Image (spheres, rainbow, N blue to C red):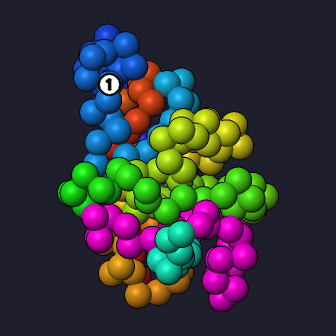
């Protein structure tokens, strides 16, 4: 059993609420995208992590066929998409440019696996023109997205335990998180 002992920060006390001018700061650094009303059950904060190395893909969208066959994605996994983009481009402005992105087929494939969360070392699963739509589509399927993962090249195994520690902020669309991989 998991018991959340954190006091939630409500809308009237929360400088990051979606009604606030500083709301965008919830989307800085490594963060989890969500709807303002979504409540994330605490049992979702610890899961099996699976590393999908697609760091060789640059000139096309990442398709399910690009996922390594050696990685078996299962229900409730936290799937980390490794592109090495952050290590190669951050903090340069090119980081927000033509970063690798998932195809709709890849997104649907991950949904079909009933995973817990998707993490990626880019600003999003897709680029800015479809970024928000994809996040909302995944949220309809109860899958959260964590963006701007750091140190992904240090993951030396394809399976590990992931701990995701978001702040307990209400009425936000982005939650700063601390992600820990236990190899």
Segment tinted magenta in the rendering:
60-89
Q: 62 above or below 13?
A: below
Q: Is residue 18 left or right of residue 21?
A: right
Visible in this render: residue 55? yes
Which residue is nearer to you in this view: 80 or 65? 65
Query: Is residue 55 positioned above or below 99 on the image?
Result: below
Residue found 38% across the figure and 73% down from its top: 84
Residue 5 in view (yes/no): no
Which residue occupies 28% across, 48% down?
29
Q: Quadrant of residue 99?
A: bottom left
Question: Looking at the image, which is closer to me, 131 or 157?
Answer: 131
Q: Position of residue 179 (x, y in %)?
A: 36, 60
On whether residue 66 falls in the magenta region, the answer is: yes
Question: Mark 1 Cα within 10 Å, few/some/many (few <14, many 20+)?
Answer: some
> In the current view of this chain or complex, which residue is farthest to the left?
91
* Residue 174 in the image, given as x and y percentages of width and height: 40, 36
Determine whether 36 is above or below 149 in the image: above
Q: Position of residue 51 (x, y in %)?
A: 52, 76
Residue hosting label 1: 23
From the top left corner, tell me how far across and down residue 154 is, in percent: 33, 81
Identify which residue, 140 or 148, lies in the foreground: 148
Label 1, secondary structure: give it: helix
Q: Residue at x 70, y 53 (%)?
A: 104
Task: Choose top left, top right, bottom left or bottom right for residue 6.
Answer: top left
Residue 78 figure quarter: bottom right
Instruction: Name which residue lies at 29% across and 42% down.
Output: 28
């Amino acid at each position: 059993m998991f018991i959340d002992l954190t006091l939630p920060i409500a809308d009237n006390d929360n400088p990051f609420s979606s009604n606030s001018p500083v709301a965008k700061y919830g989307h800085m650094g490594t963060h989890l995208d969500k709807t303002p009303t979504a409540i994330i059950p605490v049992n979702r904060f610890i899961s099996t992590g699976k590393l999908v190395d697609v760091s060789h893909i640059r000139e096309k969208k990442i398709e399910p066929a690009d996922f390594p066959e050696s990685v078996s994605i299962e229900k409730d996994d936290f799937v980390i998409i490794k592109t090495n983009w952050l290590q190669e481009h951050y903090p340069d402005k090119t980081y927000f440019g033509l970063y690798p992105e998932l195809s709709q087929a890849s997104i649907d494939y991950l949904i079909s696996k009933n995973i817990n969360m998707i993490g990626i070392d880019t600003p999003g699963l897709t680029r800015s023109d479809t970024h928000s739509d994809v996040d909302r589509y995944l949220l309809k399927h109860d899958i959260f997205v964590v963006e701007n993962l750091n140190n992904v090249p240090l993951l030396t195994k394809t399976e590990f335990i992931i701990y995701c520690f978001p702040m307990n902020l209400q009425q936000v669309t982005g939650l700063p998180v601390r992600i820990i991989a236990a190899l």
